[in-house]
Amino acid sequence: MFEFAWPWLFLLLPLPWLIRAVLPPAKTRESALKVSFLADLEQIANRRAHTRLPRGYRQVLFALFWLLLLTAGARPQWVGDPLPLQASGRDVLLAVDVSGSMDFPDMTWNGQEVSRLTLVKHLIGDFIEQRTGDRVGLILFGSQAYMQAPLTFDRHTVRTLLDEALIGIAGKNTAIGDAIGLAIKHLRDRPENSRVVILITDGANNGGRIDPLIAAQLAAEEQVRIHAIGIGADPQQNSVSSLFGFSSLDLDEDTLITITQQTGGEYFRARNRDELKAISETIDTLEPAAQQAARVRPAKALYHWPLSIAFLAGLTAAALKLWPAPWQQIGLRRQMRRKPT
């Protein structure tokens, strides 16, 4: 079915004539002297004479040009039949630690040493891309927790925002409880069996206003399932990093395990793709919640047709003004022959 997305734009159709009626005529400095033999002078100087269309024709052409522009602006489109929009019903919020310790390069990716946050970007980025049909959101937390991306089907944008995350953007400390509390706030109105939080951190809670265990109790009451991923190399692998205060011994695994147990989730250590695959499979075992039926009507844009016609018409008018057609020159010669000598 053919329709206009913005049909109200046609209300602007009389705008040029209204402006002309309201505004005063333009002042001109042209001389009032008229030279009757101007055509003869142009012929002597070997110049082309420009013939002008009658005023009525020019107004018609202008009106047609304006109508084409309004038609393109109204966004003509061909709308198809309604189609169902498939959605699994999962609502997954990723809570990623961006505190200062996440910058320490004690992890390995493709044989190279990388920082903990870099590893998270690689592993969780792939995880986000695989969540076809799920709504995914992103929380970044340090000393405070911020909603970087609300729940959305646009997984590519969420991954882009994760890739752009910077160390220390939310502070140097680790407010795990605040991150959980913010996730609960955004998930409590979603269907019960679809509320999932993936908590990713490398340290213990040392900031924020909410105790992580109290936040876990609230999550359990709101039926929010929390999976936790601990980041950091094993203690025997990062003895050098411990000299600088970034040892994985700072990771409070006991608290993370307690949080997951209270909310029905699981705890993992993120060292490679296989461990992230385990949490991906765990989320896939959740029963998708029934969502409100959504239908979408595919639309094919047609605005380029009137816009192209208007563009070609403008080029044609400019060409006729700058380079008169041969018939104009022929007509001028005939007029010159008819004049008495």
Image (cartoon, helix red, strand yellow):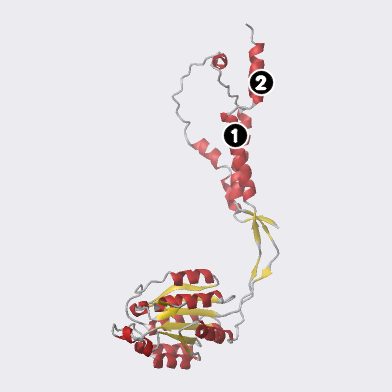
Disc 2 to disc 1, how far (Cα)?
19 Å
Residue 246, percent across and down? 33, 83
Residue 144 seen in the figure: no
Point out the image quarter for the C terminus. top right
Q: Amino acid at mark 2?
A: Ile
- Image quarter for residue 203? bottom left
Whether residue 316 is situated above or below residue 158 in the rendered picture: above
Residue that mark 2 sits on: 330
- SS state under label 2: helix
**Which residue is labeled 1 in the image?**
317
Q: Quadrant of the N terminus?
A: bottom right
Q: Determine whether, in the image, residue 85 is placed left or right of residue 172.
A: right
Q: Is residue 64 visible?
A: yes
The kind of residue tagged 1 is Ala
Q: Where is residue 100 shown, x and y percent of the image? A: 33, 77
Local crowd size for mark 2, using a 10 Å CA cut-off: few (<14), some (14–19), many (≥20): few
Q: Nearer the viewer, mark 2 or mark 1?
A: 2
**Furthest-front residue in view?**
111
Is 57 located above or below residue 219 in the figure?
above
Q: Residue at x 31, y 86 (%)?
A: 242
